[in-house]
Every structure is written in structure tokens, then in C-alpha cells.
Amino acid sequence: TSFGFKEVREDEKSRMVGNVFTSVASSYDLMNDLMSGGLHRLWKERLISKLNPFPGIKHLDVAGGTGDVAFRILENINNVGSRAMRDNRDDSIPEETQIYVCDINPHMLNVGKKRAQERGLGEDKSLIWVEGDAEALKFEDNSMDGYTIAFGIRNVTHIEKALAEANRVLKRGGRFLCLELSHVELPVLKELYDYYSFSVIPSLGELVAGDRESYQYLVESIRRFPPQDKFAKMIAEAGFQKVEYENLVGGVVAIHSGLKL
Ligand code: SAM
């Protein structure tokens, strides 16, 4: 590439992804906050407001890592639930909510389980932790109301397979939502962003996580990820309808969505 990075071969990619997340698991949350200046929190909130989860939802969060997205979904449902109860709007007992956190890396899941305890969600039966690959999900066809993947699909070796799997496990009417670092096109912002990602991020990685290589890999993987329109087309090709996306911060991140109809 123009920045002199070697192309990573496919077999190498899976291995790299494994190493990267094992190496960064413990410093992962701090790094997210530092790298995005805390913005990833807002981006995840936006993702969840688009999902609009409800009590009794059966939801799958893939590449769920340390549980960040799943906790927010659950907390969103609990807030809505208690508001409804207070307003006496809902006296029926809601069906049991199930939020599956699926990740290929057990170290990330372990950090997530620990965090669930710290948040008082350790005993919550709605959270279900599953080790598994986005490309071969261990869930039944037409079994989920929602599917999210946040900062995950970029790391998957065959994106098409992951999209096909998302489509397979969703029920009709189910929503696919993907939050991912994407491509900035605005000239000045693009230059700033390039400088930030190629100079600042690897140095931060070295300083905070003691691991420059993993964060260099992160920047490289953003570069290789398909641009917004192309990714939208891939989602449609996997069988989703009403595919659209929203750019946040000029495309630093994008939220793609699709419906299985
Ligand atoms: N979703 C979380 C968040 O937003 O904070 C974690 C994102 S983290 C950058 C990416 C996660 O994807 C890692 O936990 C990694 O283990 C996981 N991952 C990578 N390849 C995967 C695959 N093929 N299937 C499932 N998870 C995968």
C-alpha cells in the first residue's frame, strides 16, 4: 500500500486477529477510550438506538468481545421496562430477554464476564456468553430478532460468510446492524485522520498497551475494509433489504443496517 505495509495473507489474517486480541484484551477498554477520545461510547449508543431493543428480544451480538454492546442493550431494555412499569403501561410479564455475546476469543469473553460482574450484571440470566466464529454461527436458522457487530466484521476473514450467517440466523423482520471504522472522504478531515491513524495510534498502542504491532495492524485493517457503498452492496448481496448506512464523524465510523424480509 502507499504506506508501505505488507499485504497480509488470509491464513495470516486469522492468526494475526487471534494474537492481536489476546494481546490487547486487558487494556482493550482503556485503549478504546483513548483512541476515540471517548467517542466510541456515543457511537455504540447510536447503534443501540437504531436497534431499538425491547423486553423479550432474542439478540445476537457478534464479535461482542468485552460485552460493551450487550451491556448497553440490556441496560436500555431495563430502563424502558422500568419506565413502562412506572407509567403502568405494561402489566404483562415480558418474555425472557436473551442477549448472546459471541466472540472467537475466550480471553475477550473472560474480560467481558468480569466486567458484567462489576456492573452488577454477573447473575443476569439474559446475558449468554458463547465462544464462536462469525463465519459459522452455532445458532439456528431464523432464531434471532436482532444481530449487531461492532468493530468486528473488519477482522473476519471472509466477510461474505459472516453476512450470510447473519442473514441465516435472523428471523424475518429481524435487523442487521454493523458499526465499523470506515472511510473518510472529506479532504482536510481525511489528512488529519491519516496522520492520526498512522502516527498517533501505533504510538498510543506502544505506550499504553506495550504493543505497537497490534495497533499498527488495526490501522492497516481499517484501510483494507471496503468503503461504505461497497460494503452496503455486500450486505444486500447477502440477502438483506432496505440496506442503508449512516456516517458518523465524516465516515470515521459508519453504521450499516439491513432487514431480513
Ligand atoms: N464489539 C466489541 C466492542 O465494540 O467493543 C469488541 C470489538 S473488538 C475490536 C473485535 C472483536 O472481534 C474481538 O473481541 C475479536 O476476538 C473478535 N473477532 C475477531 N474475529 C472474529 C470472528 N471470526 N468471529 C467472532 N469474533 C471475532
Image (cartoon, rainbow, N blue to C red):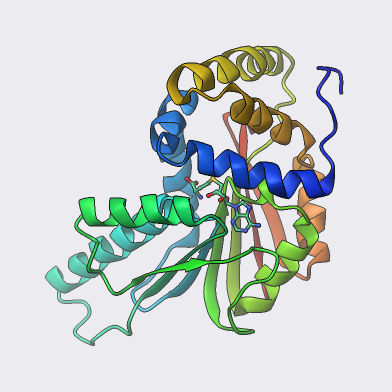
Q: Position of residue 207 (x, y in %)?
A: 47, 16
Q: Tell me which corner region of the image, top left, top right, bottom left or bottom right, holds residue 260.
A: bottom right
Looking at the image, which is closer to me, 27 or 181? 27
x and y percentages locating residue 56 in the rendered image = 36, 79
| Residue in the image at 75% along x and 31% along y | 223
| 232 shown above or below 260 | above
Q: Position of residue 104 (x, y in %)?
A: 57, 58
Q: Residue at x 72, y 63 (%)?
A: 163
Q: Is the N terminus in the top left, top right, bottom left or bottom right quadrant?
A: top right
Question: Which residue is at the front of the view, 78 or 163?
Answer: 163
Whether residue 154 can be seen here: no
Give the left or right position of residue 241, taking residue 97 as reference: right
Q: Is residue 86 above or below residue 6?
A: below
Left or right: 178, with 81 as reference point? right
Asked if residue 1 can be seen in this view, the reply is: yes
Query: Front-most of 71 and 80?
Result: 71
- Along the line of sight, which residue is nearer the eye, 96 or 200? 200
Residue, x 81% and y 17% (percent of image)?
A: 3
Quadrant into which the C terminus falls: bottom right
Number of labelled discs?
0
**Is residue 234 positioned above or below 174 on the image?**
above
Picture quarter containing residue 169?
bottom right
Q: For this view, does 79 lie left or right of residue 197?
A: left
Q: Position of residue 60 (x, y in %)?
A: 51, 68
